[in-house]
């Protein structure tokens, strides 16, 4: 498990146009992990969650509140059916 490998993979996007294209759109977690492995990097699903928490931890409170409001609206619409 290496969040540093995840950071390396994301940095490689700047150097590798094919990788950049592959990561341009949303992909499944399994596909992302396979891409990391193809580049010789050891990235796990736990690394993805850790990176997400790290990034969210550096956001200002206003941005976190905005995101929570969006998620809350989606949940309300889902619950109402």
Image (cartoon, grey):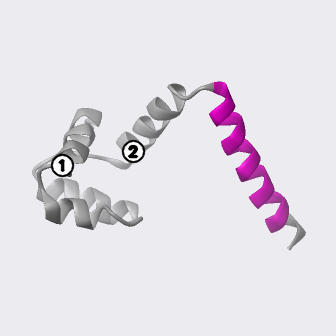
The 10 Å Cα crowd at callout 1, few under 14, some 14 to 19, many 20 or more, is: few
Task: Label 1, secondary structure: give it.
Answer: loop
Query: Eyeballing the image, is 24 above or below 71?
Result: below
Q: Position of residue 4 (x, y in %)?
A: 24, 33
Question: As rendered, which of 66 and 1 lies closer to the eye?
Answer: 66
Give me the disc on residue 48. Answer: 2
Question: As rendered, which of 47 and 10 lies closer to the eye?
Answer: 10
Quarter of the image holding residue 64? top right
Using residue 78 as the reference point, say whether residue 24 is left or right of it. left
The 10 Å Cα crowd at callout 2, few under 14, some 14 to 19, many 20 or more, is: some
Give me the disc on residue 26. Answer: none
Using residue 53 as the reference point, say whether residue 40 is left or right of it. left
The magenta segment is 61-78
Give me the residue at 26% from left, 66% from top: 22
Q: Which residue is mark 1?
A: 14
Q: Position of residue 43 (x, y in %)?
A: 26, 46
| Quarter that holds the N terminus | top left
Q: Position of residue 37 (x, y in %)?
A: 17, 55
| Quarter that holds the C terminus | bottom right
């Amino acid at each position: 498990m290496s969040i540093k490998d995840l950071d390396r993979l994301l940095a490689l996007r700047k150097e590798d146009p094919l990788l950049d294209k592959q990561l341009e759109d949303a992909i499944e977690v399994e596909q992302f992990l396979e891409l990391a492995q193809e580049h010789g990097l050891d990235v796990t699903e736990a690394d993805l969650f850790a990176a997400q928490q790290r990034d969210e931890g550096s956001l200002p409170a206003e941005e976190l509140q905005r995101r929570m409001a969006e998620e809350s609206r989606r949940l309300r619409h889902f619950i109402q059916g």
